Image (spheres, rainbow, N blue to C red):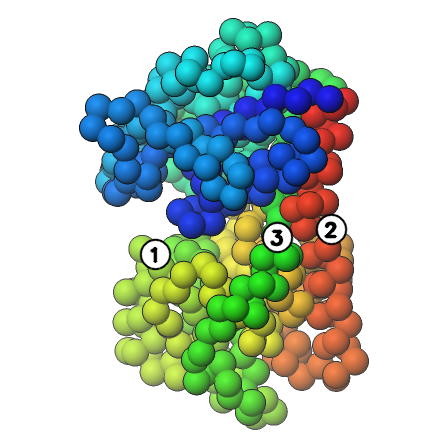
């Protein structure tokens, strides 16, 4: 057994302070199986400190549910330039702070993007300690940023990021992608190598059910029996297509056979614009709710009838996607309706709902109506398929996959 494992993720944290719990779940399950794990993360990821540090401290050592976290000092940010400095702070601080925790030395260093500076720090630490280096890709930088038109493919930032990416993909001992098409991406980049693995994001089914039982969310719109409740949770941004959904809602608000209501829980840059559109255009079957703590999401999803996965078409989706919300949707055991045209479509693979293959408002509307009018047996089959999919993406199952990669 390669007993000592370090996990590096700028944005990692336990459920109490962090929305993305992938590496907390991995660490917890690895520890239960006899591994010794440390998770290194930044103490600040946006406008406010996620974890407060003592004055002049480089890091804070804290334990959550038996998982040791080392939170590295990184400045707050409210624009892209300061965000870059936040990344640099974490990467530099990680190299310094790690010396306080290197007895015993790591056998394996798992460095996870989003940003590539964590990879570079992981590579340096792996060389320092002669440890195995596993690079995990959760977002394809810069390919995703280019697809979202953040900058051009031939721009200086793109060239720098591509150079870092190629270096890591060449030098890492093993590669993990959260998207199914990672090998395709490497092939398209003319990178030919072995030891490439796929481990998607997932859900803690035990915690999900516990939150349903213990954190009931009460809302009169969720209690209504005379309406088919379609739920969206997550960011309200232009890349998630909620304004597009408003047009869909307007198109079917007078559906004669079944009343359909869209309930939206989330926040983001387009939220006020969406509110204004709903009000101005008198879209009465779409309701934006207040933000809620993540612990209430399972209860909300459990009380709905179908869940929405939305987004605009971008080229990079041909390699597959790994949105955290999708696995919550599966765990809720309800059909998933998506307009995200993607490669390796997980919804289709498990027959857990319907994917609309283009951005047509009419086709999305028709798919939602179709699901709302399914016979009980057909609807129940979608629900059962969602639950079966969730079992395969439970973090206990995903940790077993990670162990097989570590021990290979």
Question: In the figure, is residue 195 to the left or right of 137?
Answer: right
Q: State which tag comes first along the sequence, 3 or 1.
A: 3
Q: CA distance from mark 3 to mark 1?
A: 25 Å
In front of the other: 39 or 238: 39
Q: CA distance from mark 1 to mark 2?
A: 31 Å
Q: CA distance from mark 2 to mark 3?
A: 11 Å
Residue 100 picture quarter: top left
Q: State which tag comes first along the sequence, 2 or 3.
A: 3
Residue 175 percent coordinates (x, y)? 64, 25
Q: Is residue 317 above or below residue 305?
A: above
Q: Is residue 349 above or below residue 79?
A: below
Residue 232 percent coordinates (x, y)? 49, 66
In front of the other: 65 or 154: 65
The local crowd at label 2, few if under 14, some if 14 to 19, many if 20 or more residues have their Cα within 10 Å, is some
Label 1: which residue?
Answer: 268
In the rendered image, the residue lying farthest to the left is 55
Residue 289 picture quarter: bottom left
Disc 1 is placed on an element classified as loop
Quadrant where the image shows the N terminus: top right
Disc 3 is placed on an element classified as loop
Residue drawn at point x = 56 percent, y = 15 percent: 104
Q: Is residue 269 above or below residue 92?
A: below
Given contact means CB atoms under 8 Å apart, are the residues at marks 3 and 1 in contact? no
Task: Name the mark nearer the viewer: 3 or 1.
Answer: 3
Label 3: which residue?
Answer: 204
- Is residue 250 visible to us here? no
Given contact means CB atoms under 8 Å apart, are the residues at marks 1 and 2 in contact? no
Residue 290 percent coordinates (x, y)? 34, 69
Residue drawn at point x = 36 percent, y = 64 percent: 291
Q: Which mark is residue 392?
A: 2
């Amino acid at each position: 057994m390669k007993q000592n494992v370090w996990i590096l993720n700028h944005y990692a944290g336990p459920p109490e302070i962090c929305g993305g719990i992938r590496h907390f779940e991995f660490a917890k399950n690895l520890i239960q199986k006899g591994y010794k794990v440390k998770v290194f993360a930044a103490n600040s990821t946006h406008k406010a400190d996620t974890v407060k540090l003592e004055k002049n401290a480089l890091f804070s050592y804290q334990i959550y549910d038996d998982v040791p976290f080392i939170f590295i000092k990184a400045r707050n940010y409210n624009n892209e330039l300061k965000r870059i400095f936040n990344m640099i702070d974490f990467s530099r601080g990680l190299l310094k702070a790690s010396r306080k925790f290197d007895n015993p030395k790591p056998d394996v260093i798992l460095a996870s993007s989003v940003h590539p500076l964590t990879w570079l720090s992981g590579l340096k630490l792996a060389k320092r300690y002669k440890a195995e280096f596993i690079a995990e890709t959760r977002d394809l930088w810069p390919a995703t940023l280019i697809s979202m038109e953040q900058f051009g493919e031939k721009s200086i930032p793109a060239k720098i990021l591509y150079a870092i990416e190629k270096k890591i993909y060449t030098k890492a001992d093993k590669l993990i992608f959260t998207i199914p098409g990672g090998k395709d991406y490497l092939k398209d980049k003319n990178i030919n190598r072995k030891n490439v693995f796929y481990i998607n994001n997932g859900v803690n089914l035990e915690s999900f059910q516990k939150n349903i039982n213990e954190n009931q969310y009460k809302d009169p719109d969720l209690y209504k029996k005379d309406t088919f409740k379609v739920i969206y949770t997550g960011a309200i941004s232009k890349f998630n297509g909620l304004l597009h959904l408003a047009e869909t809602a307007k198109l079917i608000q007078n559906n004669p056979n079944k009343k359909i209501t869209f309930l939206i829980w989330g926040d983001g840059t387009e939220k006020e614009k969406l509110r204004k559109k709903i009000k101005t255009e008198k879209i009465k079957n779409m309701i934006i709710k207040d933000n809620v703590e993540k612990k209430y999401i399972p209860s909300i999803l459990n009380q709905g009838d179908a869940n929405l996965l939305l987004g605009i078409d971008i080229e990079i989706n041909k390699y597959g996607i790994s949105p955290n919300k999708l696995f919550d949707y599966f765990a809720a055991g309800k059909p998933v309706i998506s307009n995200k045209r993607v490669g390796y479509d997980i919804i289709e693979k498990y027959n857990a709902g319907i994917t609309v293959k283009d951005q047509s408002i009419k086709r999305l509307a028709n798919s939602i109506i179709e699901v709302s009018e399914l016979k009980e047996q057909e609807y129940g089959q979608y629900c059962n398929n969602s639950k079966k999919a969730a079992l395969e993406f439970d973090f206990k199952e995903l940790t077993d996959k990670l162990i097989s990669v570590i021990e290979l």
